[in-house]
Image: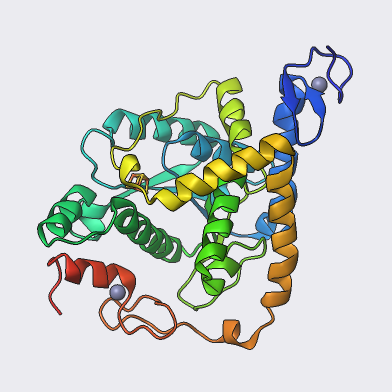
Amino acid sequence: MICNVCKAREAEVYQPHSGKRLCRKCFIEDVRARVKEESLKIGLDKANKILLAVSGGKDSYVLADTLVSFIDPQKLIAYNIIEGIHGYNRREQIEQLRKYLSSLGIELIEDSFKQSVGYTLDEMMKYSIGKGLNVSACTFCGGFRRKLINNAGRAVSADYVATGHNLDDEVQAIIINLIRGDLLRLIRFADKPIKLSSKFVLRVKPLRKVYEWETTLYAYYSGYQFQELECPYISTRPTLRAKVRELLYMLEDKKPGTLLTILEEFDKLAEKVRNQTQLKEELPTCKICGEPTSYGREICKNCELLISAGLLNY
Ligand code: SF4
Ligand code: ZN
Ligand code: ZN
């Protein structure tokens, strides 16, 4: 079968959400065009500096590769955090990532939980379990990662922090926050980022309209050797996400394009909510670390976790 776009090469990919059959080249171009469209919408092309939060997984590679197709690599700087998970964080994986980014002309900054928080994730978990806490590793991991990424963005005076979240990640997070009724967290998933604190660097997700299967295929076609090891803590992840993921895939299977529709409709709703007065107030700062925390809190969730695990005295 011939590609529906160039009408010259053999089609290799079927895109259920568009109904198109594409050759490799047109598929790559299609993904890049969607990333560019999403990025231009938020003015990423006009930024002086963008910090790319990279993990070494396929989405990090796709993020860097698609962005350099329309942004000067000198404006991009990558940042990687080693969580300190035994058997998962490997030196050769970081070197592989550094080599690839350097081939694109992007510098890589390395950081670790050990260096910037004082403990590896394994250590935090050991203490947390020792104290009888029922907190998943992902709660520690996600919270500290967000904090360190924001600090790094500020340190390099970045206008934006870009992460490699794809469409599947985004819609799962939107549904989870809807179920929890957490409007403030929910609104942060909108296409146009909002700044709730002057200490926050705006977070953007250029891959948010790209399906996960597309990022996998893009990485595969581009010949990346990405991290395929699974985090040993993944089985302890909260089960709600796994259930939501399953449900969304079932819907997508029955009606291709469902995830895209949910995201686009959500963006329209978010635009209206954005104008609410409460969202314009600056977030309070944590009494311990000085970083922004949620409305009504004196101590941020990260510091609270360390205190509960017996790793911080207050
Ligand atoms: Fe961190 Fe959880 Fe992801 Fe592992 S699965 S890297 S603990 S967020
Ligand atoms: Zn083609
Ligand atoms: Zn704090």
Q: Residue at x 15, y 55 (%)?
A: 129
- Is 79 in front, or is 147? 147
Percent of width and height locating residue 90: 28, 33
Query: Can you tell which quarter of the image residue 190 is in?
Result: bottom right
Q: Residue at x 70, y 29 (%)?
A: 28
Figure quadrant of the C terminus: bottom left
Query: Can you tell which quarter of the image residue 48 is in?
Result: bottom right
Give left or right: position of 247 versus 35: left
Residue 13 in the image: above or below residue 268: above
Tell me, what colour scheme is on the image?
Answer: rainbow
- Is 83 in front, or is 185? 185
Q: Residue at x 33, y 75 (%)?
A: 300
Percent of width and height locating residue 65: 59, 36
Query: Can you tell which quarter of the image residue 135 is in?
Result: bottom left
Percent of width and height locating residue 5: 86, 26
Residue 103 in the image: above or below residue 82: above
Query: Which quadrant of the render holds ligand 3?
Result: bottom left
Q: How many marks?
A: 0
Percent of width and height locating residue 156: 44, 61
Figure quadrant of the N terminus: top right
Residue 225 visible in this rendered orientation of the protein: yes
Give left or right: position of 253 versus 101: right
Give left or right: position of 246 versus 55: right
- Is 189 in front, or is 240? 240
Residue 159 visible in this rendered orientation of the protein: no
